[in-house]
Image (cartoon, grey):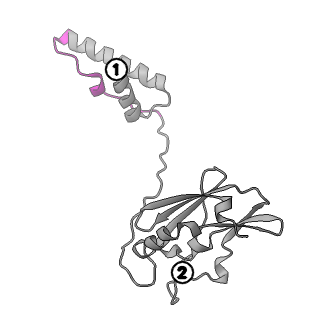
């Protein structure tokens, strides 16, 4: 069991290209350390303290940009999670709507767009698919109502094949970095 733990630590530290490289390197280092220590009359150093060779080429590491919570100072304009989260929590049943129109299913996110200034991300998944990011329009901080939807913001819906939408999953990330999610079925959100 100790060998398994040490093997996992070695893999994490070395970032080797394959598990066999790590196992062979760890085993070889262990044998060398034991041989040297035994011949010198010392006790052998644990395998995890054995020197690790440098990998020939290091793979690039890509990290997601880190997010920071925005200040939560209520302005009365509903531009922070502190102001928007209670409203969206109480109106969760209105987050999305499905409408059959012109031979298509339209999924509306108008309600979420109307409270978007306290959000940093909205993800929507259709019929069990992994939720994808749906871009949110910018907040119009120069307007009396920053959450207003202007013509330049585009349309708050997407179209799908008629009767193809059965379930909708919505995930929200607020600007205080908290998250909230909901699942909807077609019958519960369909506009007659």
Q: How many marks?
A: 2
Residue found at the far left of this picture = 41
Residue drawn at x 30%, y 26% is 48
Identify the residue position indicated by label 1 in the image.
1
Is residue 47 in the magenta section?
Answer: yes
Which of the 4 image quadrants contains residue 178? bottom left
Which of the 4 image quadrants contains residue 153? bottom right
Q: Which is more foreground, mark 1 or mark 2?
A: 2
| Vertical relation: 177 (above or below) 80 | above
Given residues 137 and 88, the one toward you in this image is 88
Residue drawn at x 31%, y 27% is 51
Left or right: residue 11 versus residue 92 is: left
Task: Give the mark nearest the N terminus, 1 or 2.
Answer: 1
Identify the residue position indicated by label 2 in the image.
147
Q: Quadrant of the C terminus?
A: bottom right
The location of residue 148, given as percent across then percent down, is 57, 83
Residue found at the far top of this picture = 39
- SS assignment at label 2: loop
Left or right: residue 137 versus residue 8 is: right
Left or right: residue 57 versus residue 37 is: right
| Vertical relation: 161 (above or below) 3 | below
Left or right: residue 14 versus residue 45 is: right
Residue 140 in view, yes or no: yes
Residue 176 numbered mark, or none = none
The location of residue 163, given as percent across then percent down, is 77, 58
Tell me which segment is drawn in magenta.
39-56
């Amino acid at each position: 069991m100790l060998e398994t733990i040490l093997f996992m630590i070695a893999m994490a530290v070395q970032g080797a290209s394959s598990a066999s490289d790590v196992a062979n390197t760890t085993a070889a280092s262990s044998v060398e350390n034991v041989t040297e220590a035994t011949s010198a009359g010392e006790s052998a150093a644990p395998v995890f303290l054995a020197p690790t060779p440098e990998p020939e080429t290091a793979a690039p590491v890509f990290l997601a940009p880190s997010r920071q919570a925005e200040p939560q100072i209520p302005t009365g304009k509903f531009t922070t999670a502190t102001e928007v989260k209670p409203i969206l929590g109480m109106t969760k049943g209105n987050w999305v709507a499905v409408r059959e129109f012109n031979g298509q299913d339209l999924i509306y996110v108008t309600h979420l767009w109307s409270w978007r200034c306290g959000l940093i991300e909205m993800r929507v998944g259709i019929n069990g698919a992994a939720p994808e990011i749906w871009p949110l329009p910018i907040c119009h901080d120069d307007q009396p109502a920053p959450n207003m939807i202007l013509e330049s913001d585009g349309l708050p819906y997407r179209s799908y094949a008629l009767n193809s939408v059965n379930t909708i999953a919505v995930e929200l990330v607020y600007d205080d970095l908290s998250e909230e999610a909901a699942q909807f079925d077609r019958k519960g959100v369909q506009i007659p």
